Amino acid sequence: MKITGYGPITTPGRATRPGAAQGRFRLPGNGAAGAASEARDAGAAEGVSIAASLIALQETMLAAERDREARARADRMLEELAELQRGILGGRLSAARLRELAALADQPAVAVDGRLAEIVGAITLRARVELARLELAAAGGVANGG
């Protein structure tokens, strides 16, 4: 069997009668008024279907954008935490880097994906813990958790 195009399916040897419903249930109508009503209903349903599809597409795009922003924020926090570690080991902490890390940790969570939100939350918590440890160290506490 070979598919050569598309269109309504017809069964060989079975002719459709003129005016018969093709692919849709129809009640006996009153001519032109019934056809106009049917066309109006089909147009309304198509409009709703298109609108719903566009809204779903927009929501998907917004969710993807929010997840992309959350990933970028998590990446920046990890970079700042790595720089913080290098600074502690090297004996030189940058106040600007600490402010950047604090600003990143204070941003609200935006991830839509639940797993991504958990990961960003864990990174944010780690950043806040490190910032608190450094505050304690600056105030005369212990920086190494002891």
Image (cartoon, helix red, strand yellow):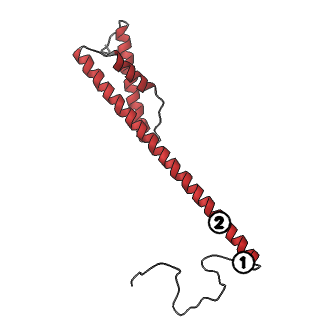
Query: Percent position (x, y) of residue 42?
Result: 65, 68
* Amino acid type of the residue tagged 2 in the rendering: Gly
Residue 52 can be seen, yes or no: yes
Q: Please tell me which residue lies in front, 132 or 61.
A: 61
Q: Secondary structure at mark 2?
A: helix
Which badge, 2 or 1, is on the more N-terminal residue?
1
Q: Residues within 10 Å of mark 1 (few under 14, many from 20)?
A: few
Residue at which label 2 appears: 43
Residue at position x 65%, y 84% from top?
Answer: 20
Discs 2/1, front = 2
Which of the 4 image quadrants contains residue 76?
Answer: top left
Residue at which label 1 appears: 27
Q: Please tell me which residue lies in front, 129 or 93.
A: 93
* Amino acid type of the residue tagged 1 in the rendering: Leu
Residue 113 can be seen, yes or no: no
Residue at position x 32%, y 25% from top?
Answer: 81
In which quadrant is the N terminus drawn?
A: bottom left
Q: Please tell me which residue lies in front, 39 or 11.
A: 39
Query: Percent position (x, y) of residue 5?
Result: 45, 79
Q: Is residue 124 above or below residue 141?
A: below
Name of the residue lying farthest toward the top: 140
Q: Disc 2 to disc 1, how far (Cα)?
A: 18 Å
Q: Is residue 100 left or right of residue 10?
A: left
In which quadrant is the C terminus drawn?
A: top left
Residue at position x 66%, y 63% from top?
Answer: 44
Q: Secondary structure at mark 1?
A: loop
Residue at position x 58%, y 59% from top?
Answer: 50
